[in-house]
Image: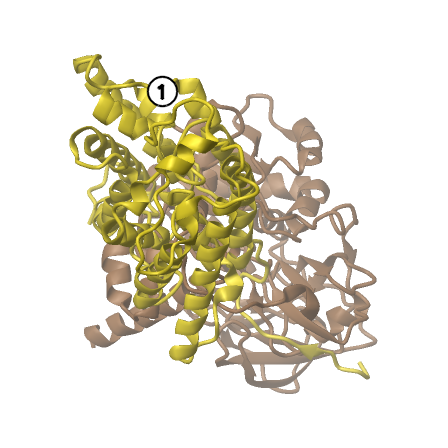
Amino acid sequence: MNLFNFFGKKTFSHGIHPEGFKEETHDHQTRRLPFAEQLTLPLSQSVGKPPIPIVHIGQQVQRGELIAKANGFMSVPLHASVSGTIKKIDLVPNAATGDKEKAIIINTALSSPQTSIQGTYQEFEQLSRDELIQSVQDIGLVGLGGAAFPAHVKMNTPKDHHVHTLIVNGCECEPFMTTDHRIMLEQIEYLFRGMGIIMKAVGAKKAIIGIEDNKLNVIEAIKPHLPKDGHITIEAVATKYPQGAGKMLVYSLMGIEIPSGHRSTSIGVIIYNVATLASLGELFPYRQGMIERVITITGDNLNKPGNYLVPIGTPLSHILKYAEFTGNEAELILGGPMMGIPAGFLNTPVKKSTGTVLVLDKRSSKDSDISPCIKCSMCLQACPINLNPSELGLLATKRKYDVMEDQYHLKDCFECGCCSYVCPSNIPLVQYFRIAKTLNRERYKQEET
Amino acid sequence: MENQPKIDIRTSPFIRKAPSVAEIMRNVVYALLPIACYAVWQFGLSALVLMITTVLACIATEHMFCKLSNKKTTIGDASAIITGLLLAMTLPPGFPLWMGAVAGFTAIAMGKTLFGGIGFNVFNPALVGRAFVQAAFPVSITTWTPALATNRFVEFIPSTLALPFMKPAPTAEWTTQVTIDGFSGATPLALMKFQGVMTDTYDLFIGLSAGSTGETSSLLILICGAYLIFKNMLDWRIPAAVILGTVISAECFHLLDATKYPTSAFMVFSGGLMFAAVFMASDMVASPVTPMGILVFGLLVGFLTVIIRLFGGLTEAVMYAILFGNAATPIIESYTQPNIFGYKGKKKP
C-alpha cells in the first residue's frame, strides 16, 4: 500500500525538491531553429549497435533521406536532417564518454527548400504487431526522455509478460526542462496517435498519462481529447525529483514496485516518454525518419531562451548564437542539471536523446571543498530507492567496489544525483557511484574473458 | 562567433542545495546560546567562565593537533565550539576551571582528533571529556551548588578558582550563605535515589533545580532543539527515540512498583536526559544513519539510562548510556540497512 497516495498527492518516498526554473521557457510557443551550415550526425544515437552508413562523400541527400541503415534489431537507422552534400564520414568526440565515434557530416544546401521526404500513407490500426515494430524501427525513433533506448526494442515485449497498461511519462522532473510540457500542449493529436500505436503493438488496454502537478494547464488541454470510455486517463503526481524515473512514476501512479533488476513489463507496465510518443504519432503515418526534436534552450545569459525545433546534428555553437548567448564563460549541459552530461566542445552536436541545452554561468556553479562525511543521514533521506549513500561513499573512497555491489545494492542506483544534491560535506557521491559501476562492469568483463 | 566562450566541465548533478558542514555547526552553536544564557542567569559568573574555559580549551586543542599533524586547521567549522559548550553544560556550575580545561583537552584530543577529526569520531567528544573528568575528579563533578544564588553575579562559586592539583575550596558553607531556604546540594536524581524524595515535575521542566550548568530547563532545551529541527539540522527522530525509550522503560518499572520507582515524567525531565537526548545523542557522526538504526539506538540509550539510574551506583546515567550507544552504532547499522526499493517480497541477496 502506498501510504503517500492514501494521504493525498500521488508520489513516492524520499527525493528532493529543487527549484524548477521553468518559468523562463514554459510559456513560449515552440519555434523552429534555422539550419546550421554544417550538421554532424554521430551514427550512434541510441543504446545498441550503431547503424551502417549507405552514403558516400560528395553525395547529394534530401532532408529525411536514409543515410545509415540499421545493423540488426538492436540498432536504429539514421536519416539526413537537412538537404545537402555529404562532406565526410569522420570520427568526432562523443560528449558523454569522451571516446571518438563515427559521424556523418553534411554541408547544408543553402538554396534548398528543405522539404522532407515522405513515404506512402499507412494506418496503424491495420498493421500487425511485427509490422508496427518494423515501422517504428524504420523511423529511427529512440527514447527521447534521455535514455536513448530504441523505441521499437521496447515495444518487442517478452512473450511471457502480459502488458496491460501504458504509462505515459510527462513528469519532466528535471529543473529547467520544458520540452515535454510544450509537447503536451502543442502536439496532443500526435501524442494520442503515438499512444494508440504502442497500445496496439503491446496489447495494452489502459493508458495513464502521468504529469507533475506543476503543469496543471496540461490537464485542461488534454481532458477534452480523452476517450469517453475512460481507458486513457491523466493523473497529476507530486512535483518532486526524480518523479520522472520510471520506477518512481509507476509506484506513484499504481503503488507497485518494479522488482529490482527487472523490466517494467514484468509487472505488466510499459513506460514511454511523451516526446517519444508525440514524435512517433507525427512521423508514423507517412513513414518519415526522425530528423528533428523539440529542445529546451535555457539557462544563464541567454536573450532568447525557449523551446526550439532543432534538427539532429546541429552544433551547440549554432544554438548559442540563435538563443543569443551574451556571456563568455559557461558550462554547457546536454540534458537537465541533475542528470545531464557536460559538453566539452562548442561543435558538439545535439543528438536524438538531447532534450535540453542548459547554459550555466560559471559563477552560479561555485564549488566548495569536500569535507569528511558527518553521517548526517540526509542522503539516506533523499535516496528514492532507499540506498545508503553515506556508507557507499565511504566504501568508494576505500575502493571497495565489490562490497558496494554485493552488500549495498550499488546496481540499483539509477544515478539520479539526489545524494550529491543534499550532501553538506559536498561529497560527490553519485559521481563516485558512476565510477564504481563502470569499474565493476569492466571487472566482470575481464572475469568473463 | 568572434569571441568563443570558454567552457567549464564538471559531471552532473550541476546544482546543489545543502547547508555546509560549518553552517550546520554554526546553527547548533546558535541553538546552544539561549541555554548558555539561561545557565549564566541561573548560576552566575562561574557558569560563564566555565563555558568560556572549556570552549577555549577545545578550540586550542583542535588547532594544536591540526598543526602537529600538518593539516589545515579545522577550527573554522565550529564543531570544537559545540564540543566545548556541550561539555560545560554537563559539568556542575562550580566545577574548577582548570579541571574544565582538562576536560576540554581530553574531549578533543581523545574523543576526536585521535580518531581523525570531524566525521571520524566514534564517541561524542564532549561525553568522552566528561567521562574522563568523572573518573578523575569524582568529588568535584558531584559537588552541586544551587541555582539563583543571591550573589551569583558578583562573586564566583568558591570551587571555581581552585588552583591546579589543589583541593577545591568547600562550597557547603558558601551554599548556606547564599540560599534562602535550606539547600542540600543534591540534584533531583540524587534526592530520588538516596532519599526517596521526588522533585516537582513542573520545577524540573522549567529548570528551577540544582543540576549541571545547562541541563536544568527541559522547556528551553526543547525550544532550542525545535529551532534546529525546523532548520533541518537536527534529526528529530533521535531525541524522539531516546525519550520514547526512557518513557517505556521507566513506565514499566513504575508500574511494577510505584513506591520504589519514579514516574516516567520525572525520568524524562530530570538530570541531563532532555539535554542529552536533544544535543548529545543526536551527534550526527556517532549515531546511526539508517532509519531503523536510529530507532534502535534511541530506544537503547533510553533503556540504558533508566537501568543505570535505577540500579547503578551513579546518579547521572545518560552520559554512559550514550557512550554505550555510540559504541554500538556500527553494529546497529550493520543489522539495520534500509530495505531497497524493488525488493518487496524478494529475498535479500
| Mark 1, residue position | B199
Provide residue B80's location: percent of width, then percent of height.
Answer: 45, 59
Chain of residue at mark 1: B
Residue A50: give x, y in percent of width and height. 46, 72
Horizontal and vertical percent position of residue A149: 46, 58
Q: Quadrant of residue B17?
A: bottom right
Q: In this view, does A48 lie above or below A237?
A: below
Q: In this view, does A112 lie to the left or right of A298?
A: right
Chain A drawn colour: brown
Q: Camera-side residue: A80 or B213?
A: B213
Q: Is residue B249 at least partly visible in the picture?
A: no
Q: Position of residue A365 (x, y in %)?
A: 64, 65
Give the color of chain B as drawn: yellow
Measuring 48% from the left and 40% from the top, which residue is drawn there? Answer: A249
Residue occupying image coordinates x 20% and y 73%: A448
Task: State which quadrant residue B346 falls in.
Answer: top left
Give the camera-side residue of A60 and A305: A305
Compared to residue B320, the image places residue B1 above or below, namely below
- Circle 1 residues within 10 Å: few <14, some 14–19, many ≥20: some
* Foreground of the two, B116 or B130: B130
